[in-house]
Image (cartoon, grey):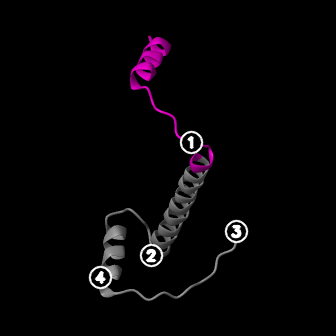
Amino acid sequence: MGTLRKTITLTDQQDSWIKAQIQAGHYTNDSEYIRDLIRREQERSLEIEATRSALVQGEASGEPKRFDIVAFKQKMRTAHD
């Protein structure tokens, strides 16, 4: 995978935060920290999209049915005892 050099602008507070993360040993340099942030955001976006998709599927699945908690608990006890 190729890499590209980018220039970003940070506030003093953001720069101090990144430097503190590096000094604490969480990252070896600024680029590693920024790449980790991007990876986390990519994962978060995928999780959000999966949740949205599940909600759409749920809404499209039809009318809701009453949930019988007593029957559910009994079923779980029977299955796991």
Residue 63 circle label: 1
Residue position for label 2: 30
Q: Nearer the viewer, mark 4 or mark 1?
A: 1
- Tell me which numbered mark, 4 or 3, is placed earlier along the sequence: 3
User: What distance separates the C-alpha of mark 4 from that of mark 1?
Assistant: 51 Å
Assign a secondary structure to mark 2.
Answer: helix
Which circle's residue, 3 or 2, is located before the other in the chain? 3
Q: Tell me where the magenta segment starts and ends, as one range.
A: 58-81
Give the mark toward the camera: 3 or 1. Answer: 1
| Mark sitting earlier along the chain (2/4) | 4
Classify mark 2: residues with Cα within 10 Å, few (<14), some (14-19) or many (20+): some
The kind of residue on which mark 3 rests is Met
Q: CA distance from mark 4 to mark 3?
A: 32 Å
Give me the C-alpha separation between circle 3 and circle 2.
19 Å
List x then y, in percent, for residue 67. Answer: 45, 31
User: Does 76 lie within the magenta span?
Assistant: yes
- x 56%, y 42%: residue: 63
- Dot 4 lies on which element? helix
| Kind of residue indicated by mark 2 | Asp
Image side of residue 48 versus residue 10, left or right: right
Badge 4 or badge 1: first in the primary sequence: 4
- CB atoms at circles 4 and 3 under 8 Å apart? no
The residue to which callout 3 is attached is 1
| C-alpha distance separating marks 2 and 4 | 14 Å
Task: Say which label, 3 or 1, has the lower sequence index.
Answer: 3
Give the numbered dot on residue 38: none
Disc assigned to residue 13: 4
Q: Disc 4 marks which amino acid? A: Gln
Residue nearest the viewer, comparing 62 with 48: 62
